[in-house]
Image (spheres, coloured by chain):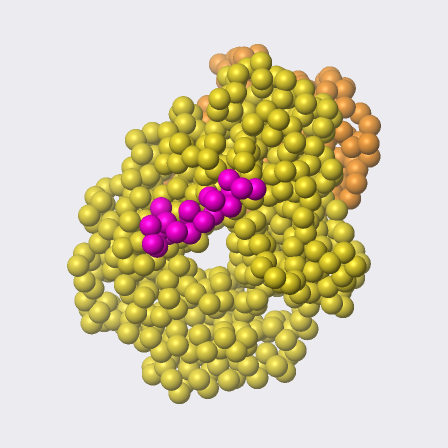
């Protein structure tokens, strides 16, 4: 019997799915950072995203590269992979991909557990970060930055941690529409985890 | 924050939720804030304000019987429902209801493809079947059929048809309401009804003859609130063997008369798919002089605009034509189009486009470089390949591609298929922007100008569209947007132009202008509504139709 939390997972896979474990159980099974974040969508148009993705890939994270169109990633690669249960998924993308993944993820039983907006100047010399996540994760990110780590390293550190926690409330995407100026671009980092 | 339906106490609501749980199962009644968040309009003009059109809960029935049970519970507790198939048409409010506190009836779990006929060319689907689902099933069965998907394709044939959405192939198919053939609905009473030949139990023609016998109420369920559609027939275009494009350009503004006349002729002979009108002059909008001329208040100086186009060595307008058929028939039709253009459109030039065997490869679909330069055709849609690429460009700021601007920032206005009408709309909208104070408007390219062009999504009319875009990072901008759109509606109505569709927040405003003979149409619809839905539980306010129980909310949506 298809569970409540996966009802659009059925639609995106195009056939009835038989998922036996609950979302809560699936999320709770993901107890370590290494196993919690197994999949990451990376927009390779962002150099910093590519850097983080390569490092996470070396830790065993499966990386899906995109340059905008995420259709095939979702419908052909990620959704069919959830036949055995939904898992957290991360992304380093532009606004458009964040938007589509959040909506598709919601229907699959996921919610936003982490959302970072990284304003990057065109020459890469200046960055500004705003992170919405649980207080623990926000503190981890701030501490990592304060410790002298580069922001890409700090992000690389906290993303798996954010994926390891079942989300009880989710993060509001209040600033999804935050405008960038002509001299900067915005990279979104995000983690979707099973709704508890 | 708990949101309750109008006039319902917390105790009554809790009782209703228990009754819904009994109807569909506890797992399928969604009430948590996290769950409800998925049913918000992400671009609501009243986001986070007291009037935001948030639901109180959502229920997700899996069968027609469960839909019936949900309707009965709603009647018992007098709770307004708002049915969505996938709820993903975010340009029109997504799943947000007309009445704050409504219970969303999420039909995504109803996703059976009940019939799919590759010889008689139709499908019968439940509302949760998406365009992806239908496409995949066609491929899996190896049928020579095409879907006709809107962009993006995560929506459903049911929802898009019922909202009178469009696609991008041949005229009869891209008008989704017209290509629908037969519906099954759960009425407010909980009774099931089938329209057209579906009313004849043994009929095998439900998806082949839409009218049945006697008055056909099917239209009441399109942009309406008279029932919850649980099955819909969809006519499907056979997969053609070949796809071809060609372009006709004209050098001067006034040449649009002949160009549109020619395209109308070809379209109504069903020789072409969607004609895509555009202007190659958009890049010149960055030039202050051209911008000033193309957005000049009062009147355009056509001679000056034509001269600027000539200096840039660019045509003023163009249309891209699309042909479906065999290699030979598409070639012959394009040759005929060129002949007509040469004969009837002085100064026109014709350029051969692409010529592909169907189905196209992914590389062919995504290749935007045609022999005549980048195409305005969204080819994945033209050849009906479902995707989500829309979100990579729609609503994006031209100078800041990582910024989304407001997706509710424009109207699709129905106007006659003539150059005269196009020019009238350009004039009215340019003046409107000036009068409204141009500081409200960003410099996004599609702002009203002499370059604003029609869309021929429906076979028999034009839609005119322009962005009246405002970022909504600051709340006052949202209010400014609402003000701007109301100005557009007023100007449009004054000129006899109406909107074909809108999000719930604006439906009363749009409907208010369809007021011939003291709102005779609305009075008729509401008399019917009160008769068949006495408690007014089905999507009150949708399409501007308010049942007696909620009529006091007319004009107060979002307030």
Q: Is residue B254 magenta?
A: no
Reply above or below: B384 against B93.
below
Give the image quarter of residue A168: top right
Q: Could you say which chain is coloured orange in the image? A: A
Q: Is residue B531 magenta?
A: yes
Q: Quadrant of the C terminus of chain A?
A: top right
Residue at 65 percent of width and 28 percent of height: B73
Q: Colour of chain B?
A: yellow
Count of number-bearing discs: 0
Predominant secondary structure, magenta span: helix
Left or right, residue B470 beside residue B378 = left
Residue at 46 percent of width and 32 percent of height: B550
Residue at 48 percent of width and 37 percent of height: B547
Q: Is residue B423 visible?
A: yes
Residue B255 picture location, percent across and down: 32, 76
Left or right, residue B205 beside residue B365 = right
Reply above or below: B99 against B397.
above
Give the image quarter of residue B472: top left
Q: Is residue A39 visible?
A: no
Residue A14 picture location, percent across and down: 74, 45
Reply above or below: B302 against A7.
below
Reply above or below: A53 against B177.
above
Q: Quadrant of the N terminus of chain A?
A: top right
Q: Closest to the observer: B303 or B529?
A: B529
Residue B392 picture location, percent across and down: 51, 47
Q: Closest to the observer: B53 or B316?
A: B53
What's the magenta region?
A: B512-532
Q: Closest to the observer: B115 or B365?
A: B115
Residue at 57 percent of width and 84 percent of height: B332
């Amino acid at each position: 019997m298809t569970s409540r939390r996966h009802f659009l997972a059925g639609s995106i896979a195009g056939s009835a799915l038989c998922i036996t474990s609950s979302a809560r159980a699936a999320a709770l099974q993901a107890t370590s950072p290494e196993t919690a974040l197994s999949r990451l969508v990376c927009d390779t148009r962002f150099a910093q995203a590519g850097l983080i993705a390569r490092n996470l890939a070396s830790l065993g994270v499966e990386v899906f590269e995109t340059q905008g169109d995420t259709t095939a990633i979702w419908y052909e690669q990620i959704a069919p992979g959830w036949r055995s249960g939904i898992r957290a998924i991360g992304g380093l993308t532009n606004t458009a991909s964040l938007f589509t993944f959040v909506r598709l993820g919601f229907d699959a039983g996921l919610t936003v557990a982490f959302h970072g907006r990284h304003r990057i100047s065109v020459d890469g010399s200046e960055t500004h970060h705003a992170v919405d996540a649980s207080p623990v994760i926000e503190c981890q990110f701030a501490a990592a930055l304060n410790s002298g780590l580069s922001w890409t390293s700090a992000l690389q550190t906290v993303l798996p941690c954010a994926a390891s926690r079942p989300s009880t409330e989710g993060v509001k995407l209040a600033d999804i529409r935050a405008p960038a100026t002509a001299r900067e671009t915005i990279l979104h980092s995000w983690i979707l985890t099973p709704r508890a | 924050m708990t949101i309750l339906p109008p006039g319902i106490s917390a105790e009554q609501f809790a009782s209703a939720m228990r009754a819904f749980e009994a109807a569909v199962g506890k797992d399928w009644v969604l009430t948590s804030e996290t769950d409800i968040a998925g049913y918000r309009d992400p671009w609501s003009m009243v986001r986070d304000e007291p009037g935001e059109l948030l639901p109180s809960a959502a229920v997700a029935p899996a069968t027609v019987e469960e839909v019936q049970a949900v309707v009965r519970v709603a009647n018992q507790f007098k709770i307004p429902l708002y049915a969505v198939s996938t709820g993903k048409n975010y340009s029109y409010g997504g799943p947000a209801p007309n009445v704050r506190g409504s219970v969303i009836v999420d039909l995504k779990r109803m996703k059976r493809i009940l019939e799919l006929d590759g010889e008689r060319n139709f499908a019968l689907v439940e509302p949760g079947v998406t365009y992806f689902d239908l496409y995949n099933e066609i491929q899996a069965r190896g049928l020579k059929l095409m879907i006709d998907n809107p962009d993006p394709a995560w929506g459903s044939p049911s929802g898009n048809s019922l909202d009178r959405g469009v696609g991008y192939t041949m005229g009869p198919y891209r008008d989704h309401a017209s290509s629908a053939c037969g519906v099954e609905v759960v009425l407010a009473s909980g009774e099931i009804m089938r329209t057209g030949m579906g009313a004849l139990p043994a009929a095998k023609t439900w998806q082949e003859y839409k009218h049945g016998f006697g008055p056909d109420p099917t239209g009441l369920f399109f942009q309406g609130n008279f029932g919850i559609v649980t099955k819909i027939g969809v006519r499907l275009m056979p997969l053609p063997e070949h796809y071809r494009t060609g372009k006709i350009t004209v050098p001067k503004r006034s040449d649009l008369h002949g160009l549109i006349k020619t395209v109308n002729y070809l379209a109504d002979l069903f020789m072409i798919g969607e004609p895509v009108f555009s202007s190659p002059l958009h890049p010149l909008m960055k030039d202050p002089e051209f911008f000033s001329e193309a957005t000049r208040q009062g009147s355009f100086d056509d001679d000056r605009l034509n001269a600027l186009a000539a200096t840039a060595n660019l045509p003023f307008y163009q249309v891209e034509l699309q042909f479906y058929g065999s290699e030979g028939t598409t070639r012959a039709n394009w040759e005929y189009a060129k002949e007509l253009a040469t004969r009837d459109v002085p100064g026109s030039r014709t350029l051969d486009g692409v010529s592909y065997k169907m189905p196209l490869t992914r590389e062919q679909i995504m290749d935007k470089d045609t022999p005549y330069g980048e195409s305005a055709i969204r080819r994945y849609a033209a050849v009906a390949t479902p995707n989500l690429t829309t979100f990579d460009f729609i609503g994006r700021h031209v100078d800041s591609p990582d910024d989304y601007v407001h997706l509710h920032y424009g109207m699709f206005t129905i106007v006659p298929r003539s150059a005269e009408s196009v020019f009238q709309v350009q004039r009215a909208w340019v003046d409107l922007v000036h009068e409204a104070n141009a500081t409200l408007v960003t410099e996004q390219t599609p702002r009203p100008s002499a370059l604003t062009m029609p869309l021929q999504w429906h076979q028999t009319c034009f839609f005119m569209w322009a962005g009246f875009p405002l970022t909504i990072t600051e709340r006052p901008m949202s209010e400014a947007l609402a003000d701007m759109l109301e100005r557009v509606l007023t100007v449009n109505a004054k000129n006899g132009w109406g909107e074909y569709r809108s999000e719930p927040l604006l439906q009363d405003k749009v409907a208010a202008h369809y007021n011939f003979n003291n709102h005779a149409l609305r009075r008729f619809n509401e008399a019917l509504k009160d008769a068949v839905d006495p408690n007014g539980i089905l999507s009150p306010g949708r399409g501007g139709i308010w049942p007696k129980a909620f009529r006091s909310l007319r004009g107060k949506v979002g307030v």
